[in-house]
Image (cartoon, rainbow, N blue to C red):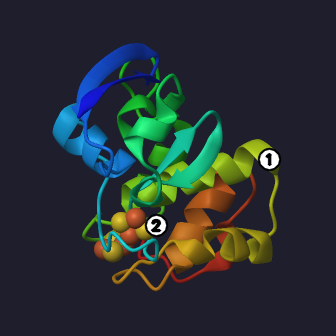
Amino acid sequence: MGKVTMTVNGRQMTAEAEGRTLLSTWLREGLGLTGTHVGCDTSQCGACVVHVDGQPVKSCTALAMDLDGAEVRTIEGMANADGSLSAIQQAFQDHHGLQCGFCTPGMVMAAAALLKENPKPTEAEVRHYLEGNICRCTGYHNIVKAVLAASGQDVSGLGIAAE
Ligand code: FES
Ligand code: FES
């Protein structure tokens, strides 16, 4: 057991961790940041994706102790400074990219990482990038549509969404 400090959503935060404490557990139980969801704990669903030093990471695959000093961004840090939804979050809402919402934090964090490295992805590139993020509800179509819309592309021809 020891103290771990990271810069989380721009603020230095410290909480206890055991050697086996996962980053997902540290964020949720140590810091109370429960926006990061845990769907499987076995690296399969992607609900727990956060950014560590700018890179998307499944937080159930990383040990908190190993990340002392890291810079982490979670879904709680994605809104704009005035509290309004970020472009990606707004696009998920506008294009019905969620139903139960369980996968959504991980989807938003993964989508943000994709758009940072590839600001105008094709539909195929979005689908490929989000392969590690499982959604049981939506059939993915509107998630892909939301990500394309967030990148500023015209999605009016993509159909299906119940708008
Ligand atoms: S909880 Fe981490 S991948 Fe499912
Ligand atoms: S919206 Fe329910 S799992 Fe994706």
Mark 1, Cα crowd under 10 Å, few <14 / some 14-19 / many 20+, is few
Q: Earlier in the sequence, mark 2 or mark 1?
A: 2
Percent position of residue 43, x then y: 46, 71
Ligand 2 position by quadrant: bottom left
Q: Nearer the viewer, residue 14 or 9?
A: 14
Q: Look at the numbered disc 2 and say if its residue's Cβ is closer than 8 Å to ligand 1.
A: yes
Q: CA distance from mark 2 to mark 1?
A: 19 Å
- Residue named by callout 1: 117
Q: Left or right: 141 with respect to 46?
A: right
Amino acid carrying label 2: it is Gly
Residue 19 horizontal/vertical position (percent):
33, 45
Q: Residue at x 55, y 79 (%)?
A: 141
Task: Name the residue carrying label 2.
Answer: 46
Say which element carries label 2. loop
**Closer to the camera: disc 2 or disc 1?**
2
Q: Quadrant of the C terminus?
A: bottom left
Residue 151 appears in view:
no
Left or right of 33 on screen, residue 95: right
Residue plotted at (51% across, 79% down):
140
State which quarter of the image contains the N terminus. top left
Q: Residue 22 at x, y = what percent?
A: 34, 51
- The amino acid at mark 1 is Glu
User: Badge 2: how crowded within 10 Å, few (<14), some, or many (20+)?
Assistant: many
